[in-house]
Amino acid sequence: MPELYTTLLTELARFDLAYVHLEATTDEETLVGLRKSWGGTLIVNPVVPMGPDRTDRPAADRWLGLGADLISFGRSFISNPDLVERLRADLPIVEDDPSRWYQGGDAGYLDYSTYRHTA
């Protein structure tokens, strides 16, 4: 299967796309090989989509070191409106609550708070 995706990325490169976004649905070696096949901007989500894990700072740093240009955090942004600051300051990441998704209204999307420093 890596050969198929390598061919696909080679063909897509002809269209001058803004980026390609890969998700960790295969092994790391395959994803690193695809990075080598794609010369443009690469966004990586280093965890299995909708799996139990969330993208965290160590995973992001690892993939930036492996050649990703950007990291997608997905669900972590839902529950952390200040995610960028939390990552910069190495603050804890709040887990999202999937039972509140798609219920209508703001609950579960807009009601998570920013980090509160304590004295």
Image: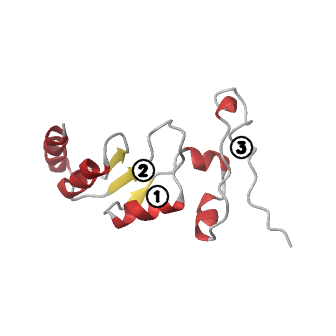
Residue 45 is situated, as x and y percent measured from the top left of the image, at 42, 49
Q: Quadrant of the C terminus?
A: bottom right
* Dot 2 or dot 1, earlier in sequence: 2
For residue 64, side relative to residue 109 (left or right) = left
- Placement of 63 over or under 2, stated as above or below: below
For the point 35% across and 47% down, the residue is 21
Mark 2 in CB contact with mark 1 (< 8 angstroms): yes
**Disc 3 secondary structure class:** loop
Q: Quadrant of the N terminus?
A: top left
According to the picture, the residue beneath numbered tag 3 turns out to be 110
Q: What residue type is labelled 2?
A: Pro
For residue 79, side relative to residue 34 (left or right) = right
The disc at residue 3 is none
According to the picture, the residue beneath numbered tag 1 turns out to be 59
Per the model, the C-alpha gap separating discs 1 and 3 is 26 Å
Specify the farthest residue to the right: 119
Q: Which amino acid does label 1 sit on?
A: Ala
Which color scheme did the rendering employ for the protein?
Answer: secondary structure
Q: Which amino acid does label 3 sit on?
A: Leu
According to the picture, the residue beneath numbered tag 2 turns out to be 46
Question: What is the tally of numbered marks visible in this picture?
Answer: 3
* Dot 1 or dot 3, earlier in sequence: 1
Mark 1 in CB contact with mark 3 (< 8 angstroms): no
